[in-house]
């Protein structure tokens, strides 16, 4: 109703802010009038859960900064005048509070005996509820659907899993802190990650809440005494190891280290590298490239990996002559030393077929 009727049909301040805020406020009053339900967590751990929600917001902030450092920042589209920020805080505050009170009530009223089934079901339900439904009407091809599913639906589901877990253990307050903090970061920050690389945004947006959930669950169970002393250390190390491994895999795929994977899309370097193989690229300055190296460099709006077959000096600079092993002639343009992005140090056969299939679906 919010993004399908009030905003598009009524418009203006009334349709976009005041009427939605009134609607959410009425929902809050309705939920407060329902029979009280007890949260699934231990009452004495309420303070821990509230701090855990704040830590989750801080982790999300770090992930957002990392995404921006890798993919670049862009100017936020939201109003950052004092009046605009105040209106955003009031309208979003009412919406988040209503949603999280409803989430906590439904979960703890009907799923106390089967918490993880309830957490999964409620997370799915609220993901559908919170998605911008007007976006569905602008999805006209497979590429748009894929980007929407990977860049919006899956990260939103991941965030809802964490919010639902917090709502189960601590009621609406920790969930309000988490989701309210996430929205505040998005609406109040003057700069946001550019979002041009939706795959990177999807990876960070999906795995960050899941890793945070693992961390919060482990800390809570230990503090609440739900983990036997003999198993605490083993469980903690296994979850910590899984979380660190997930983070390292994300960073590797995004090129945070000096090595990054690259799917081969053409057969110009066959038989050394075939379509569907994954090349591991080591970032090096052009001064370190030598004859025989397979180097990666920009070519138009693409990146190419070809072999250096000769070096020549020209106008006081060093240039490379490159050629695909399967090509009959060298590349037409000389490669400037400064344009070398890295060299291939390893090839993993056929690992990139799923990516090629996904591109084919686009």
Image (spheres, grey):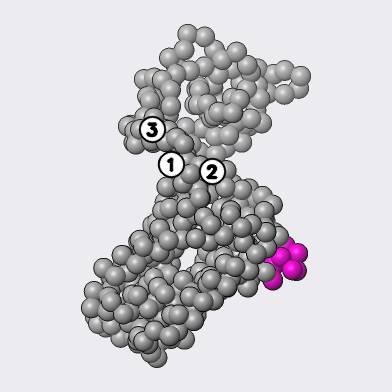
What range of the chain is rendered magenta?
80-86
Disc ID at residue 361: 3
Q: Residue furthest front?
A: 10
Q: For the residues marked 1 and 2, what is the alpha-carbon distance in whole angstroms?
A: 15 Å
Q: Residue at x 64, y 30 (%)?
A: 339
- Look at the picture and state if 101 lies above or below 251: below
Whether pointer 3 and pointer 2 mark residues with C-beta atoms closer than 8 Å, the reply is: no
Mark 1 / mark 2, whichever is N-terminal? 1
Disc 2: which residue: 197
The image shows residue 72 at horizontal and vertical percentages of 63, 48
Q: From this viewpoint, is residue 293 visible?
A: no
Mark 2 lies on a secondary structure that is loop
Tell me the crowding category of disc 3: few under 14, some 14 to 19, or many 20 or more residues within 10 angstroms, Cα based.
few
The image shows residue 330 at horizontal and vertical percentages of 54, 12
Disc 1: which residue: 145
**From the image, which quarter does the C terminus lie in?**
top left
Q: Residue at x 50, y 50 (%)?
A: 134
Main SS category, magenta section: helix
- Look at the picture and state if 238 lies above or below 53: above
Residue 264: quarter of image? top left
Mark 1 lies on a secondary structure that is helix
**So how many labels did they put on this image?**
3
């Amino acid at each position: 109703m919010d993004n399908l009727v009030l905003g598009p049909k009524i418009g203006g301040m009334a349709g976009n802010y005041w009427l939605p805020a009134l609607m959410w406020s009425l929902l809050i009053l309705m939920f407060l009038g329902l029979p009280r339900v007890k949260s699934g967590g231990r009452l004495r751990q309420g303070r821990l859960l509230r701090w855990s929600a704040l830590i989750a917001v801080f982790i999300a902030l770090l992930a957002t900064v990392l995404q921006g450092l890798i993919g670049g920042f862009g100017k936020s589209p939201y109003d950052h005048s004092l009046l605009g920020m105040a209106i955003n805080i009031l309208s979003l505050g009412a919406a988040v509070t209503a949603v999280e009170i409803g989430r906590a009530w439904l979960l703890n009223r009907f799923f106390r005996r089967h918490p993880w089934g309830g957490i999964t079901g409620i997370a799915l339900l609220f993901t559908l509820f919170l998605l911008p439904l007007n976006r569905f009407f602008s999805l006209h091809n497979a590429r748009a659907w894929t980007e929407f599913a990977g860049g919006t639906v899956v990260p939103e589901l991941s965030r809802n899993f964490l919010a639902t877990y917090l709502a189960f253990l601590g009621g609406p307050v920790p969930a309000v802190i988490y989701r309210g903090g996430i929205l505040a970061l998005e609406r109040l920050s003057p700069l946001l990650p550019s979002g041009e690389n939706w795959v990177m945004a999807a990876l960070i947006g999906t795995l960050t809440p899941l890793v945070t959930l693992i961390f919060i669950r482990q800390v809570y169970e230990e503090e609440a005494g739900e983990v036997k002393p003999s198993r605490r250390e083993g469980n903690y190390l296994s979850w910590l190891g899984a979380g660190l491994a997930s983070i390292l895999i994300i960073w590797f795929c995004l090129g945070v280290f000096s090595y990054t994977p690259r799917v081969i899309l053409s057969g110009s370097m066959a038989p050394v590298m075939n379509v569907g193989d994954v090349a591991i690229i080591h970032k090096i300055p052009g001064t370190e490239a030598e004859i025989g190296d397979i180097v990666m460099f920009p070519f138009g709006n693409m990146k190419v990996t070809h072999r250096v077959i000769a070096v020549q000096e020209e106008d006081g600079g060093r240039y490379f002559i490159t050629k695909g092993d399967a090509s009959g002639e060298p590349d037409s343009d000389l490669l400037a030393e400064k344009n070398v992005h890295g060299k291939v140090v390893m090839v993993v056969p056929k690992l990139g077929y799923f990516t090629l299939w996904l591109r084919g679906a686009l």
